[in-house]
Image: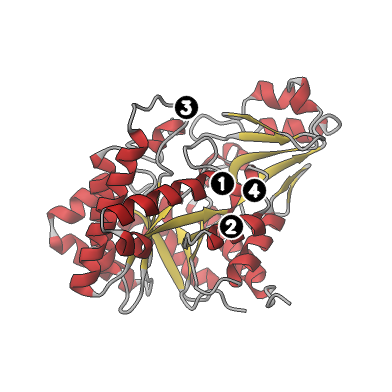
Amino acid sequence: MTISALPLSYCTNVHPGRSLAEVAHGLDEYTAPLKSQFGQPLAAGLWLAQPVIAELTADPRAVVGLRDKLQTHDLTCHTLNAFPYGDFHSRRVKENVYLPDWSQPERRDYTIACGQILAELLPPETEGSISTVPLGFKGFQHPEGFIESCLDQLLQTAKQFDEIYSRTGTLIRLAIEPEPFCLLETTAETVAFFNQLWTRADDTGLGEPARRHLGVCYDVCHQAVEFEDVPRSIQALDEAGIRINKLHISCAIQLDDPAENEAGRRALAAYVEPRYLHQTFALTKTGQVLHQIDLTEDLALEPPPPFREAQRWRVHFHVPVDAETLGPLRTTRQELRHALQSVADLDYPPHLEVETYTWEVLPEAAKTDTTQSSLVEGLTRELLGTRELLSELQPAS
Protein backbone atom coordinates (compact mmCIF):
# COMPACT_ATOMS: atom_id res chain seq x y z
CA MET A 1 0.00 0.00 0.00
CA THR A 2 1.31 3.47 -0.90
CA ILE A 3 0.55 6.24 1.57
CA SER A 4 1.71 9.08 -0.68
CA ALA A 5 2.81 9.52 -4.26
CA LEU A 6 5.22 12.26 -3.16
CA PRO A 7 8.89 11.51 -2.51
CA LEU A 8 9.81 10.67 1.07
CA SER A 9 11.03 13.78 2.89
CA TYR A 10 13.69 14.26 5.54
CA CYS A 11 13.87 17.34 7.75
CA THR A 12 16.92 19.56 7.30
CA ASN A 13 16.79 20.80 10.91
CA VAL A 14 19.36 18.04 11.54
CA HIS A 15 22.08 20.39 10.28
CA PRO A 16 22.55 24.13 10.88
CA GLY A 17 20.50 26.55 8.82
CA ARG A 18 20.74 29.88 10.59
CA SER A 19 21.27 31.81 7.35
CA LEU A 20 20.40 31.29 3.71
CA ALA A 21 24.06 30.49 3.04
CA GLU A 22 23.95 27.72 5.68
CA VAL A 23 20.76 26.31 4.17
CA ALA A 24 22.39 26.18 0.74
CA HIS A 25 25.53 24.62 2.24
CA GLY A 26 23.42 21.94 3.91
CA LEU A 27 21.74 21.05 0.63
CA ASP A 28 25.15 20.74 -1.06
CA GLU A 29 26.97 18.89 1.71
CA TYR A 30 24.28 16.65 3.14
CA THR A 31 21.05 16.50 1.16
CA ALA A 32 22.50 15.93 -2.30
CA PRO A 33 24.84 13.09 -1.17
CA LEU A 34 21.97 11.62 0.87
CA LYS A 35 19.76 11.53 -2.21
CA SER A 36 22.55 9.86 -4.17
CA GLN A 37 22.99 7.13 -1.54
CA PHE A 38 19.24 6.65 -1.06
CA GLY A 39 18.87 5.97 -4.76
CA GLN A 40 15.27 7.20 -5.03
CA PRO A 41 13.52 10.57 -5.37
CA LEU A 42 13.92 12.59 -2.19
CA ALA A 43 12.28 15.72 -0.84
CA ALA A 44 13.98 18.24 1.41
CA GLY A 45 11.77 19.16 4.35
CA LEU A 46 13.34 22.57 4.79
CA TRP A 47 13.79 24.19 8.18
CA LEU A 48 13.78 27.90 7.36
CA ALA A 49 14.39 29.85 10.57
CA GLN A 50 13.10 33.40 10.93
CA PRO A 51 16.40 35.02 9.85
CA VAL A 52 16.37 32.89 6.69
CA ILE A 53 12.77 33.82 5.94
CA ALA A 54 13.75 37.48 6.42
CA GLU A 55 16.51 37.07 3.83
CA LEU A 56 14.17 35.37 1.37
CA THR A 57 11.43 37.95 1.88
CA ALA A 58 13.80 40.88 1.39
CA ASP A 59 15.04 39.74 -2.01
CA PRO A 60 12.82 37.87 -4.50
CA ARG A 61 15.97 36.73 -6.31
CA ALA A 62 16.92 34.77 -3.18
CA VAL A 63 13.78 32.62 -3.49
CA VAL A 64 14.61 31.94 -7.13
CA GLY A 65 18.14 31.00 -6.07
CA LEU A 66 16.86 28.55 -3.46
CA ARG A 67 14.45 27.00 -5.95
CA ASP A 68 17.29 26.68 -8.46
CA LYS A 69 19.48 25.07 -5.81
CA LEU A 70 16.81 22.42 -5.19
CA GLN A 71 16.39 21.81 -8.91
CA THR A 72 20.16 21.53 -9.41
CA HIS A 73 20.20 18.58 -7.02
CA ASP A 74 16.94 17.15 -8.40
CA LEU A 75 15.26 17.74 -5.04
CA THR A 76 11.69 18.79 -4.35
CA CYS A 77 10.26 20.59 -1.32
CA HIS A 78 6.67 20.20 -0.25
CA THR A 79 6.93 20.78 3.50
CA LEU A 80 8.62 23.21 5.87
CA ASN A 81 9.46 22.87 9.55
CA ALA A 82 8.53 26.23 11.09
CA PHE A 83 8.59 24.94 14.68
CA PRO A 84 12.06 26.33 15.59
CA TYR A 85 11.85 30.10 15.05
CA GLY A 86 15.48 30.84 15.91
CA ASP A 87 18.77 29.00 16.31
CA PHE A 88 18.00 25.29 16.70
CA HIS A 89 21.70 24.48 17.02
CA SER A 90 22.70 26.82 19.85
CA ARG A 91 24.35 25.39 22.96
CA ARG A 92 21.04 25.46 24.83
CA VAL A 93 17.70 25.23 23.04
CA LYS A 94 15.48 23.42 25.60
CA GLU A 95 12.19 25.26 26.25
CA ASN A 96 13.26 28.28 24.15
CA VAL A 97 12.20 26.38 21.04
CA TYR A 98 8.56 27.13 21.94
CA LEU A 99 9.09 30.90 21.64
CA PRO A 100 7.48 32.95 20.28
CA ASP A 101 4.26 31.14 21.06
CA TRP A 102 1.02 31.28 19.10
CA SER A 103 -0.41 34.15 21.14
CA GLN A 104 2.26 36.44 19.68
CA PRO A 105 2.03 38.15 16.27
CA GLU A 106 5.68 37.31 15.58
CA ARG A 107 4.76 33.63 15.33
CA ARG A 108 1.82 34.42 13.03
CA ASP A 109 3.82 36.72 10.74
CA TYR A 110 6.71 34.27 10.49
CA THR A 111 4.36 31.41 9.63
CA ILE A 112 2.51 33.40 6.99
CA ALA A 113 5.85 34.35 5.41
CA CYS A 114 6.81 30.65 5.43
CA GLY A 115 3.60 29.91 3.55
CA GLN A 116 4.36 32.54 0.95
CA ILE A 117 7.88 31.17 0.41
CA LEU A 118 6.69 27.55 0.27
CA ALA A 119 4.10 28.47 -2.35
CA GLU A 120 6.98 29.56 -4.59
CA LEU A 121 9.06 26.45 -3.92
CA LEU A 122 6.35 23.83 -4.43
CA PRO A 123 6.29 21.69 -7.56
CA PRO A 124 3.22 22.32 -9.74
CA GLU A 125 -0.09 20.89 -8.49
CA THR A 126 1.40 19.91 -5.13
CA GLU A 127 -0.02 20.81 -1.72
CA GLY A 128 2.33 22.20 0.91
CA SER A 129 2.48 21.70 4.68
CA ILE A 130 4.15 23.63 7.50
CA SER A 131 4.64 22.18 10.99
CA THR A 132 4.51 24.50 13.97
CA VAL A 133 4.54 24.88 17.76
CA PRO A 134 1.61 23.38 19.76
CA LEU A 135 0.54 26.82 21.01
CA GLY A 136 3.08 27.13 23.84
CA PHE A 137 4.94 25.46 26.68
CA LYS A 138 3.12 24.42 29.85
CA GLY A 139 6.13 25.38 31.96
CA PHE A 140 5.72 29.07 31.07
CA GLN A 141 3.29 31.54 32.64
CA HIS A 142 0.52 32.47 30.23
CA PRO A 143 -1.67 35.55 30.64
CA GLU A 144 -5.43 35.50 30.82
CA GLY A 145 -6.87 35.21 27.34
CA PHE A 146 -3.86 33.30 26.02
CA ILE A 147 -5.90 30.59 24.26
CA GLU A 148 -8.20 33.16 22.71
CA SER A 149 -5.15 35.00 21.33
CA CYS A 150 -3.84 31.74 19.88
CA LEU A 151 -7.21 31.07 18.23
CA ASP A 152 -7.23 34.51 16.65
CA GLN A 153 -3.63 34.30 15.38
CA LEU A 154 -4.24 30.86 13.87
CA LEU A 155 -7.41 32.00 12.13
CA GLN A 156 -5.63 35.04 10.72
CA THR A 157 -2.99 32.66 9.38
CA ALA A 158 -5.64 30.44 7.82
CA LYS A 159 -7.19 33.52 6.20
CA GLN A 160 -3.84 34.52 4.69
CA PHE A 161 -3.19 30.98 3.46
CA ASP A 162 -6.64 31.04 1.87
CA GLU A 163 -5.75 34.24 0.06
CA ILE A 164 -2.67 32.48 -1.34
CA TYR A 165 -4.94 29.63 -2.39
CA SER A 166 -7.45 31.94 -4.07
CA ARG A 167 -4.73 33.90 -5.86
CA THR A 168 -2.47 31.05 -6.99
CA GLY A 169 -4.38 27.80 -6.57
CA THR A 170 -1.61 26.59 -4.25
CA LEU A 171 -2.90 24.96 -1.06
CA ILE A 172 -0.76 25.36 2.07
CA ARG A 173 -1.79 23.47 5.21
CA LEU A 174 -0.58 24.35 8.69
CA ALA A 175 0.29 21.37 10.90
CA ILE A 176 0.21 22.02 14.66
CA GLU A 177 2.52 19.51 16.32
CA PRO A 178 1.48 18.18 19.77
CA GLU A 179 4.48 17.62 22.01
CA PRO A 180 5.05 16.51 25.64
CA PHE A 181 4.71 19.31 28.22
CA CYS A 182 3.15 21.68 25.68
CA LEU A 183 -0.36 23.12 25.81
CA LEU A 184 -1.29 20.55 23.20
CA GLU A 185 0.41 17.30 24.12
CA THR A 186 -2.24 14.57 24.30
CA THR A 187 -4.73 13.60 21.64
CA ALA A 188 -7.59 14.54 23.98
CA GLU A 189 -6.16 18.05 24.49
CA THR A 190 -5.70 18.41 20.74
CA VAL A 191 -9.27 17.37 19.95
CA ALA A 192 -10.65 19.73 22.61
CA PHE A 193 -8.66 22.65 21.23
CA PHE A 194 -9.69 22.02 17.64
CA ASN A 195 -13.33 21.91 18.74
CA GLN A 196 -12.78 25.41 20.15
CA LEU A 197 -11.02 26.41 16.95
CA TRP A 198 -13.84 25.20 14.70
CA THR A 199 -16.39 27.02 16.85
CA ARG A 200 -14.43 30.29 16.72
CA ALA A 201 -13.90 29.86 12.99
CA ASP A 202 -17.61 29.32 12.34
CA ASP A 203 -18.51 32.33 14.50
CA THR A 204 -16.14 34.58 12.52
CA GLY A 205 -17.08 33.30 9.06
CA LEU A 206 -13.78 31.46 8.61
CA GLY A 207 -15.06 27.92 9.02
CA GLU A 208 -14.18 26.76 5.52
CA PRO A 209 -10.67 28.30 5.37
CA ALA A 210 -9.89 27.01 8.87
CA ARG A 211 -10.84 23.43 8.05
CA ARG A 212 -9.01 23.62 4.72
CA HIS A 213 -5.74 25.00 6.06
CA LEU A 214 -5.45 23.96 9.73
CA GLY A 215 -4.62 20.49 11.05
CA VAL A 216 -1.89 18.64 12.91
CA CYS A 217 1.58 17.28 12.47
CA TYR A 218 1.52 13.84 14.05
CA ASP A 219 4.97 13.20 15.49
CA VAL A 220 4.98 9.49 16.33
CA CYS A 221 7.76 9.86 18.92
CA HIS A 222 5.71 12.40 20.88
CA GLN A 223 2.53 10.35 21.20
CA ALA A 224 4.52 7.20 21.93
CA VAL A 225 6.29 9.02 24.79
CA GLU A 226 2.85 9.86 26.20
CA PHE A 227 2.08 6.10 26.19
CA GLU A 228 -0.90 6.72 23.92
CA ASP A 229 -2.40 3.95 21.83
CA VAL A 230 -1.19 5.28 18.48
CA PRO A 231 -3.87 3.70 16.21
CA ARG A 232 -6.65 4.91 18.53
CA SER A 233 -5.05 8.34 18.67
CA ILE A 234 -4.98 8.66 14.88
CA GLN A 235 -8.56 7.35 14.69
CA ALA A 236 -9.71 9.91 17.27
CA LEU A 237 -8.21 12.77 15.28
CA ASP A 238 -9.85 11.51 12.11
CA GLU A 239 -13.24 11.11 13.78
CA ALA A 240 -12.97 14.66 15.14
CA GLY A 241 -12.44 16.02 11.61
CA ILE A 242 -8.84 17.00 12.33
CA ARG A 243 -6.64 16.42 9.30
CA ILE A 244 -3.14 15.00 9.79
CA ASN A 245 -1.35 17.25 7.35
CA LYS A 246 2.09 15.83 8.14
CA LEU A 247 3.48 12.72 9.81
CA HIS A 248 6.85 12.96 11.50
CA ILE A 249 8.50 9.56 11.18
CA SER A 250 10.34 9.38 14.49
CA CYS A 251 11.23 7.05 17.36
CA ALA A 252 11.76 7.59 21.08
CA ILE A 253 13.95 5.78 23.62
CA GLN A 254 12.32 3.05 25.71
CA LEU A 255 13.74 1.64 28.97
CA ASP A 256 12.07 -1.58 30.10
CA ASP A 257 11.98 -2.78 33.73
CA PRO A 258 14.08 0.09 35.14
CA ALA A 259 14.34 -1.48 38.63
CA GLU A 260 16.20 -4.51 37.29
CA ASN A 261 17.77 -2.96 34.20
CA GLU A 262 20.74 -1.12 35.69
CA ALA A 263 22.66 -1.42 32.43
CA GLY A 264 19.76 0.26 30.65
CA ARG A 265 19.68 3.11 33.17
CA ARG A 266 23.43 3.64 32.79
CA ALA A 267 23.03 3.67 29.03
CA LEU A 268 20.16 6.13 29.34
CA ALA A 269 22.30 8.47 31.45
CA ALA A 270 24.61 8.87 28.46
CA TYR A 271 21.74 10.56 26.59
CA VAL A 272 21.62 13.46 29.05
CA GLU A 273 22.79 16.54 27.15
CA PRO A 274 22.39 20.33 27.43
CA ARG A 275 20.87 21.33 24.07
CA TYR A 276 17.39 19.82 23.74
CA LEU A 277 14.57 19.05 26.16
CA HIS A 278 14.08 15.32 26.77
CA GLN A 279 10.75 14.92 28.53
CA THR A 280 10.65 11.57 30.36
CA PHE A 281 7.53 9.50 31.07
CA ALA A 282 7.04 6.31 33.08
CA LEU A 283 4.19 3.79 32.87
CA THR A 284 3.52 2.27 36.28
CA LYS A 285 2.26 -1.25 36.91
CA THR A 286 -1.17 0.20 37.73
CA GLY A 287 -1.34 2.06 34.41
CA GLN A 288 -0.56 5.51 35.78
CA VAL A 289 1.72 7.72 33.66
CA LEU A 290 4.38 9.70 35.54
CA HIS A 291 6.45 12.44 33.96
CA GLN A 292 9.55 14.57 34.43
CA ILE A 293 10.21 17.69 32.41
CA ASP A 294 13.73 16.63 31.38
CA LEU A 295 16.05 13.65 31.54
CA THR A 296 18.81 14.05 34.13
CA GLU A 297 21.61 11.81 35.33
CA ASP A 298 20.01 11.66 38.78
CA LEU A 299 16.73 10.47 37.29
CA ALA A 300 18.45 7.81 35.20
CA LEU A 301 20.92 6.53 37.80
CA GLU A 302 19.01 7.07 41.06
CA PRO A 303 15.33 7.28 40.11
CA PRO A 304 12.72 7.95 42.80
CA PRO A 305 10.74 4.82 43.80
CA PRO A 306 7.70 5.42 41.56
CA PHE A 307 9.94 5.74 38.50
CA ARG A 308 12.20 2.86 39.56
CA GLU A 309 9.28 0.46 40.02
CA ALA A 310 7.52 1.40 36.76
CA GLN A 311 7.02 -1.05 33.90
CA ARG A 312 8.93 1.09 31.42
CA TRP A 313 10.05 4.60 30.60
CA ARG A 314 9.90 6.51 27.35
CA VAL A 315 12.05 9.54 26.64
CA HIS A 316 11.52 12.32 24.11
CA PHE A 317 14.85 11.85 22.39
CA HIS A 318 14.54 11.35 18.64
CA VAL A 319 16.72 8.34 17.85
CA PRO A 320 17.44 6.80 14.42
CA VAL A 321 14.25 5.28 13.08
CA ASP A 322 15.99 2.21 11.66
CA ALA A 323 16.98 1.07 15.18
CA GLU A 324 14.91 -1.44 17.17
CA THR A 325 17.39 -1.42 20.06
CA LEU A 326 20.19 0.79 21.38
CA GLY A 327 22.29 -1.60 23.43
CA PRO A 328 20.25 -2.42 26.55
CA LEU A 329 17.62 0.15 25.53
CA ARG A 330 14.76 -0.27 23.10
CA THR A 331 13.07 2.20 20.77
CA THR A 332 9.43 2.81 19.88
CA ARG A 333 9.82 1.52 16.32
CA GLN A 334 6.83 -0.77 16.82
CA GLU A 335 4.65 2.26 17.50
CA LEU A 336 5.99 3.77 14.28
CA ARG A 337 4.84 0.65 12.42
CA HIS A 338 1.37 1.07 13.92
CA ALA A 339 1.29 4.75 12.96
CA LEU A 340 2.22 4.12 9.34
CA GLN A 341 -0.43 1.40 9.06
CA SER A 342 -3.08 3.65 10.57
CA VAL A 343 -2.19 6.57 8.33
CA ALA A 344 -2.26 4.29 5.30
CA ASP A 345 -5.91 3.56 6.12
CA LEU A 346 -6.92 7.24 5.98
CA ASP A 347 -8.69 8.48 2.87
CA TYR A 348 -6.04 11.15 2.18
CA PRO A 349 -2.21 11.13 2.16
CA PRO A 350 -0.36 13.13 4.82
CA HIS A 351 3.14 14.31 4.01
CA LEU A 352 5.75 11.86 5.34
CA GLU A 353 8.94 13.27 6.84
CA VAL A 354 11.77 11.54 8.69
CA GLU A 355 12.74 13.86 11.56
CA THR A 356 15.73 12.83 13.65
CA TYR A 357 17.37 16.13 14.54
CA THR A 358 19.56 14.81 17.36
CA TRP A 359 22.50 13.25 15.50
CA GLU A 360 24.94 15.85 16.88
CA VAL A 361 23.96 15.09 20.50
CA LEU A 362 23.73 11.29 20.40
CA PRO A 363 26.19 9.62 22.82
CA GLU A 364 28.15 8.26 19.84
CA ALA A 365 28.72 11.84 18.61
CA ALA A 366 30.55 12.67 21.85
CA LYS A 367 33.00 9.82 21.24
CA THR A 368 33.75 10.51 17.58
CA ASP A 369 33.65 13.42 15.18
CA THR A 370 30.27 13.85 13.53
CA THR A 371 31.62 14.06 10.01
CA GLN A 372 29.70 14.82 6.86
CA SER A 373 30.09 11.24 5.67
CA SER A 374 28.96 9.67 8.96
CA LEU A 375 25.86 11.87 9.11
CA VAL A 376 24.93 11.10 5.50
CA GLU A 377 25.43 7.38 6.17
CA GLY A 378 23.23 7.53 9.26
CA LEU A 379 20.49 9.46 7.47
CA THR A 380 20.68 7.01 4.57
CA ARG A 381 20.12 4.09 6.95
CA GLU A 382 17.08 5.91 8.33
CA LEU A 383 15.59 6.46 4.90
CA LEU A 384 16.24 2.86 3.87
CA GLY A 385 14.72 1.69 7.17
CA THR A 386 11.66 3.84 6.52
CA ARG A 387 11.34 2.43 3.02
CA GLU A 388 11.42 -1.04 4.58
CA LEU A 389 8.61 -0.13 6.99
CA LEU A 390 6.52 1.33 4.18
CA SER A 391 6.97 -1.84 2.16
CA GLU A 392 5.48 -3.84 5.05
CA LEU A 393 2.15 -2.04 4.88
CA GLN A 394 -0.85 -4.13 3.97
CA PRO A 395 -4.47 -3.04 3.60
CA ALA A 396 -6.47 -3.46 6.80
CA SER A 397 -8.68 -6.56 6.70
Residue at disc 2, secondary structure: helix
Pick the front one: 377 or 71: 71
Give coordinates of residue 287: x percent, y percent.
77, 38
Residue at mark 1 to residue at mark 2: CA–CA distance: 8 Å
Q: Which kind of residue does numbered mark 1 sit on? A: Ala
Q: Do the residues bearing badges 1 and 2 touch, measured as CB atoms within 8 Å?
A: yes
Residue at mark 4 to residue at mark 1: CA–CA distance: 14 Å
Pick the front one: 149 or 198: 198
Look at 63% across and 43% down and name the residue there: 225
Residue at mark 4 to residue at mark 2: CA–CA distance: 15 Å
Q: Residue 236 carries which label?
A: 2
Q: Do the residues bearing badges 3 and 4 touch, measured as CB atoms within 8 Å?
A: no
Give coordinates of residue 239: x percent, y percent.
55, 62
Q: Do the residues bearing badges 4 and 1 touch, measured as CB atoms within 8 Å?
A: no
Q: Which kind of residue does numbered mark 2 sit on? A: Ala
Look at 38% across and 44% down and name the residue there: 84
Look at 24% across and 41% down and name the residue there: 106
Look at 47% across and 73% down and name the residue there: 7
Q: Residue 188 carries which label?
A: 1
First-in-chain label (4 vs 2): 4
Nearer to us of marks 3 and 1 is 1
Residue at disc 3, secondary structure: loop
Q: Quadrant of residue 390?
A: bottom right
Q: Which mark is residue 139?
A: 3
Q: In this view, does 12 lie above or below 351?
A: above
Q: Mark 4 points at which residue?
A: 224
Task: State whether residue 86 appears in this view.
Answer: no
First-in-chain label (3 vs 1): 3
